[in-house]
Image: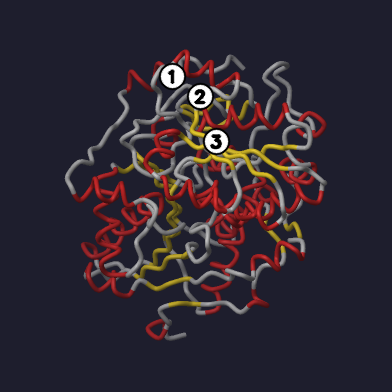
Amino acid sequence: MNTTNIPYKIYLNEDEMPTSWYNLRADMKTKPAPLLNPGTGQPLTADELKPIFCEELVAQELDETTAMIPIPDEIRSFYKMYRPSPLVRAYCLEEKLGTPAKIYYKFEGNNTSGSHKLNSAIAQAYYAKKQGLKGVTTETGAGQWGTALSMACSYFDLDCKVYMVKCSYEQKPFRREVMRTYGASVVPSPSDSTEVGKKILAEHPGTTGSLGCAISEAVEVATKNPGYRYVLGSVLNQVLLHQSVIGLETKKAVEKYDIHPDIIIGCAGGGSNLGGLIAPFMGEKLRGEADYRIIAVEPASCPSFTRGTYAYDFCDTGMICPLAKMYTLGSSFIPSPNHAGGLRFHGMSSTLSQLYHDGYMEAVSVEQTSVFQAAEQFARVEGILPAPESSHAIRVAIDEALKCKETGEEKTIIFGLTGTGYFDLVAYEKFHNGEMSDQIPTDEEIAASVAKLPKV
């Protein structure tokens, strides 16, 4: 095929949209370590998880042998409102960079929530409704997940309680108002409305919060209110499963035009976007059918992959959630409030952590001023204002394309554009006013947090 004739946007037809999610764990030779009960130190059973999560989601969380899990018709019908999403050739960016590299991005911002998060939100809301629940609780960092879940719960007439990281709550009032428009209640976290919130505030007066704090509050509320369950927007196996629609569509699109990726890049906070994008490609790599260079990009202010410890840790600051084996900075780690956007979780998906530990993927951390430089460069030539999270991937995609310019190699790069940045204009304003700085935790700060890891 003549790749010079590849269109700017590659769209699949509705009938080409995935009918099943892909469970990457089925092809992993070394499975991710199981979640542990913090009280007993033993692997959690389905019965122990059911008071926290919806029953069907518990089954998905624990299933590590079924490769393809059918997408219910109700969820697939909802997906059709905004899926399949386009795979876009960044011709203008290539030209500006003067690179021989071919750059593509999978754009997930073409839905009302503005990000890829809706792929899992609608699935989790569907299973909650199917189970006959009253509502769900959750946390949100930058606000994309909270927005997506609010929209999904509105669709299924479910109550939605969102605990939003306090610094984001204050920096992003319009994101908060979108959630409220969809009927969700939004509380800045940590708050004095929960026991764990009060404890965190007492121990860390004036704290700007973290995802770990917000998770603790959301879980407490879910477990104390009959008819409610907790849902999470990243990290968990079930979330990576739902997000595999991103990678499955990308894989079908590249095959349709005989495109052969060399490098696949995704931003990484908890792992939902990265895990979804790379899933089928990583599956090929695990089965020995193909090879790709896969790069996880994280913020230098919250560098769990590149500076974290691979160990069992609590998924939340309040230490009430199960223990997960992951690359972690310690559950007490709180990123600098100067860090713009999401990617604030102290740990990383157990599945991605295992793959990274086994050498199947790379990780790099980038500083936020360079991230916003890349975001601005991309916006000026590609016409989309990218979310700060996605801009981490843009930064490294540009860096890799410039390396190709130096060497003359014609590599094909794909990165995930997880969503738009129109609710992140306070961060863009700080960048343009020269008020943005790079806050990087010291070795001593990380060591102090890691020293508190549970003894497992």
Please say if the residues under marks 1 and 2 sit with CB atoms less than 8 Å apart.
yes
Residue at point 31%, 43% (across, down): 366
Q: For mark 3, what is the residue?
A: 163
Q: Which percent across, then down, holds residue 372? A: 27, 51
Amino acid carrying label 1: it is Ser
Amino acid carrying label 3: it is Tyr
- Residue 168: name its quadrant: top left
Lower sequence index among marks 1 and 2: 2
Label 2, secondary structure: give it. Answer: loop
Label 3, secondary structure: give it. Answer: strand
Q: Nearer the viewer, residue 147 or 95?
A: 147
Residue at point 38%, 31% (across, down): 335
Label 1, secondary structure: give it. Answer: helix
Residue placed farthest to the left in the image?
434
Q: Nearer the viewer, residue 231 or 169?
A: 169
Query: Which label sits on residue 331?
Result: 2
